[in-house]
Amino acid sequence: MKVVILGKGEMLANLIRGAMLADADIVGIFRYENLIYSKFKLLLHDFFKSSPDLTLIKKHKLNDIKLKSANSEEFRNLLVKLNADIVLVGTWKEKLSKETYNIPSVGTINVHPSLLPAYRGPNPYLQTIWHREKFSGITFHLMTENFDQGPILAQDKIEILEGDTGKELKNKTVFRARLLCARLLEKLKKGCVEPTDQDEEKASYFGNVRPEDMTLNFKKETAEEICAHVRAFHPFLPTYIQIENSFKIINPYQIKISALNGSPAEVLEQSETTITIACKDGKSVEFSGLKKYRGRIRD
């Protein structure tokens, strides 16, 4: 089974490893960085900041596809030339056109880090923690003209632990993607996978967060919601506490619900690097390891 993989970073690296576990014939890797960098900038990027996916490409002498678009005639012609059975997509900038995703003989499979149809959208790692879910997941589904809406081929549920930030959830998810990728490719070789349509009544979508979401609002969020908010945004975006006209950057690993109670947004204790603030429900959260932010938060 000939496989072409599109993607970025840890997700791409784990899809490569998953395809290897299934003994698939990886005939091409198309890295996200090709879309956003010029040839010269990509050369510098790869020299100074080697990524896990690039390390695998070099180590195993894989075909590193250097084109500017997955919707280009050059890429479509290459898929035909490579006689690709499957295109795997994990973290990609473009919306693939029907002319592209219909070329592989088996299909183009998108990898989405949630239990679809729940949490469609660009960053389910952040959104599932922010909404205080107990579980997230990984879904492999056939690509269609609508984002994250194609028939499901395989899914795995992933537990979100109490202290997990977006970083820990992402690490667990991409590793699970590796294992599920291997199992799915093995089943596809045997022709024993039956696609399942997504239940639109259970669908949810969350778009990109806004700049104002980076600042905590103690009058509108409970203590538990504040903690989830901070954990969700790490490492994608920093979260801030506004104290008068200055901002403090929060360490997501040094927050806890305090025994102190007070009025919403009341500062109960404060030092240079620690502050305890009461929330909407009267409970308070203690933040340690604070750092002063010297830039400007956009409105």
Image (spheres, rainbow, N blue to C red):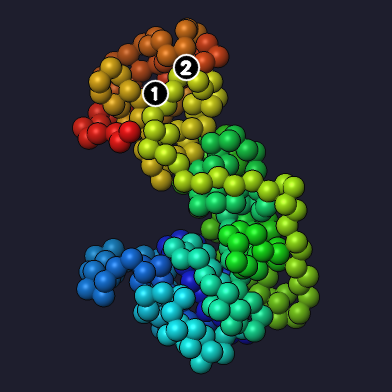
**Mark drawn on residue 167:** none
Looking at the image, can residue 20 be seen? no
Which residue is pictured at 42% across the width and 85% down the height?
A: 74
Q: Is residue 47 above or below residue 277?
A: below
Q: Quadrant of the N terminus?
A: bottom right
The quarter of the picture where residue 41 lies is bottom left
Which residue is pictured at 46% across the width and 75% down the height?
A: 70
Q: Secondary structure at mark 1?
A: strand
- Between 211 and 30, the residue placed more toward the observer is 211
Q: Is residue 283 above or below residue 125?
A: above
Q: What amino acid is labelled 2 in the image?
A: Lys
**Mark drawn on residue 287:** 1
Q: Is residue 273 above or below residue 249?
A: above
Which residue is pictured at 38% across the width and 42% down the height?
A: 237
Is 294 left or right of 32, judged from the image as shown? left
Percent x, y of residue 42: 28, 70
**Residue at the spot of label 2:** 219
Looking at the image, which residue sits at the far top?
262
Which residue is pictured at 61% across the width and 79% down the height?
A: 102
Q: CA distance from mark 1 to mark 2?
A: 17 Å
Q: What amino acid is labelled 1 in the image?
A: Phe
- Between 82 and 208, the residue placed more toward the observer is 208
How would you rate the neighbour count of disc 1 (Cα within 10 Å): few for under 14, some for 14-19, many for 20 or more? many
